[in-house]
Image (spheres, rainbow, N blue to C red):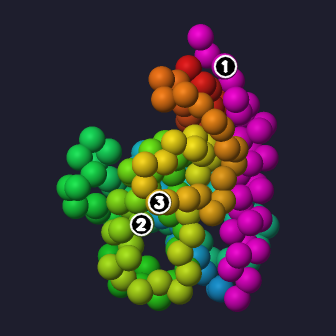
């Protein structure tokens, strides 16, 4: 049984709100790196980037972050070299924050390079963290059981988030 928790319209609203929060957090920056965790996190990142470019004059630099979610200890790779995001403001983005495993290994990767400011953003925060990581910007926060699953669909005609 699917329970829709975010409709297309709600996702658009949450994305716009997160974009405004990012813009307000980096008032003195000319550019910001949005690093999205592949695959759905990167799709969400591109949605935030489009909103940011619409509402601000910030130069948005997109970065795709590849993390093996089954084997998070494997090396993390990015579409940008460390020199391309060093000493910049960076936001690490994912669609769902479950246990925090993916996000914490993503954070760890970026800590090897000096950054001006580092924030995290997620569309859905499940409140089941096993690691000391938090989302600075979140679309919705849900308390769910461990047996429940959040499905986020961002591609296609009917973007939504559901609780299964």
The reply, left or right, for residue 135 in relation to residue 109 is right
Residue at point 62%, 26% (across, down): 162
Which part of the image, by quadrant, shows the C terminus? Answer: top right
Question: Residue 23 is drawn in which quadrant?
Answer: bottom right
Q: Which of the numbered marks, if any, corresponds to residue 3?
A: 1
Q: Which of the numbered marks, if any, corresponds to residue 132?
A: 3
Q: Residue 117's spot in the image, x, y percent?
A: 56, 81
In terms of sequence position, does the residue under pointer 2 or pointer 3 come before the other?
Answer: 2
Question: Residue 59 is drawn in which quadrant?
Answer: bottom right
Q: Residues within 10 Å of mark 2 (few under 14, many from 20)?
A: some
In terms of sequence position, does the residue under pointer 2 or pointer 1 come before the other?
Answer: 1
User: Which residue appears farthest toward the left when viewing the image?
Assistant: 74
Nearer to us of marks 2 and 3 is: 3
The reply, left or right, for residue 86 in relation to residue 164 is left
Q: Is residue 71 magenta?
A: no
Q: Which of the numbered marks, if any, corresponds to residue 107?
A: 2
Q: Nearer the viewer, residue 49 or 123?
A: 123
* Magenta highlight range: 1-28
Q: Residue 35's spot in the image, x, y percent?
A: 48, 64
Residue at point 36%, 82% (across, down): 113
Q: Secondary structure at mark 1?
A: strand
């Amino acid at each position: 049984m699917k329970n829709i928790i975010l409709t297309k319209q709600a996702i658009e609203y949450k994305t716009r709100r997160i974009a405004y929060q990012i813009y307000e957090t980096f008032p003195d920056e000319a550019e910001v790196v949005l690093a999205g965790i592949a695959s759905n996190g990167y799709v969400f990142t591109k949605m935030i980037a489009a909103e940011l470019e619409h509402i601000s004059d910030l130069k948005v630099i997109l970065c795709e972050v590849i993390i093996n979610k089954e084997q998070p200890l494997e090396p993390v790779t990015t579409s940008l070299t460390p020199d391309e995001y060093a000493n910049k403001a960076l936001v690490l983005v994912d669609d769902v924050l479950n246990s925090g495993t993916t996000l914490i290994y993503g954070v760890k990767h970026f800590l090897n390079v000096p950054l001006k400011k580092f924030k995290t953003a997620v569309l859905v925060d499940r409140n089941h963290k096993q690691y000391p990581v938090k989302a600075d910007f979140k679309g919705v926060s849900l308390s769910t059981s461990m047996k429940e699953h959040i499905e986020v669909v961002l591609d296609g005609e009917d973007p939504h988030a559901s609780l299964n």
